[in-house]
Amino acid sequence: MQPDLTKREKLFISLYAKTRDARSSAALAGYSAPRLSAHRLLARQEIAAEISRTIASQTPPPDESAQGYRRLSFGSTADAVILLRNWETLTDSDIEKLDLFNVSEIRLPKSGGMEIRFFDRLKALEKLENSRSCTSAGDDLLAALREGAEKLGGVGD
């Protein structure tokens, strides 16, 4: 990485290259206003160039939907608990730093308090397993087609 980048900028670049989520990458890198910081960072030419270099040097990322299902299946709910217990005292900046990816709904009932609903982990696991088996079946079919094509190619010789 370029030496003129700060440690926090380098961390943002690394996180963004993995997740492609600018806001959460900025939050995890420690920026106090993640949305605004992410926008400003991505607008900087040297940051964008370093992100491109980092992404190009990585192995291809797994399917994004599989990554999402993996996060839903195995992700932490700790930040949602923090929100639930402290929602009246948290600032907008504090809330923006929370990882609420697994949250499907947040409600403030008229009777008071807060309700948080999560995405169904079992359904996410099923989708993740289905995406793996589809990929595996697709790979098996492709291998069989290649093998058949090779055998057919040898018949005419």
Image (cartoon, rainbow, N blue to C red):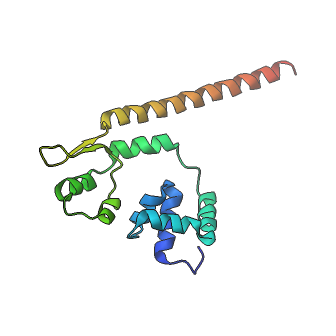
In this view, the residue in front, 29 or 40, is 40
Q: Is residue 54 above or below residue 103?
A: below
Q: Is residue 90 left or right of residue 149?
A: left
Is residue 13 at least partly visible in the picture? no
Is residue 22 at least partly visible in the picture? yes
Q: Residue furthest bottom?
A: 4
Residue 143 image point, x, y percent: 64, 29
Q: Is residue 118 left or right of residue 144?
A: left
Residue 37 image point, x, y percent: 47, 68
Q: Is residue 49 above or below residue 151?
A: below
At 48% from the left edge and 40% from the top edge, which residue is drawn?
65
Q: Residue furthest right?
A: 157
Total numbered labels: 0
- Tell me the quarter of the picture where residue 97 sits: bottom left
Quadrant location, the N terminus? bottom right
Residue 8 image point, x, y percent: 46, 73
- Tell me the quarter of the picture where residue 46 sits: bottom right
Q: Is residue 60 left or right of residue 132?
A: right
At 68% from the left edge and 24% from the top edge, which residue is drawn?
145
Residue 62 image point, x, y percent: 52, 45
At 40% from the left edge and 67% from the top edge, which residue is drawn?
33
Q: Residue furthest front?
A: 110
In this view, the residue in front, 81 or 156, is 81
Q: Is residue 75 left or right of residue 10?
A: left
Quadrant location, the C terminus? top right
At 42% from the left edge and 64% from the top edge, which residue is drawn?
34
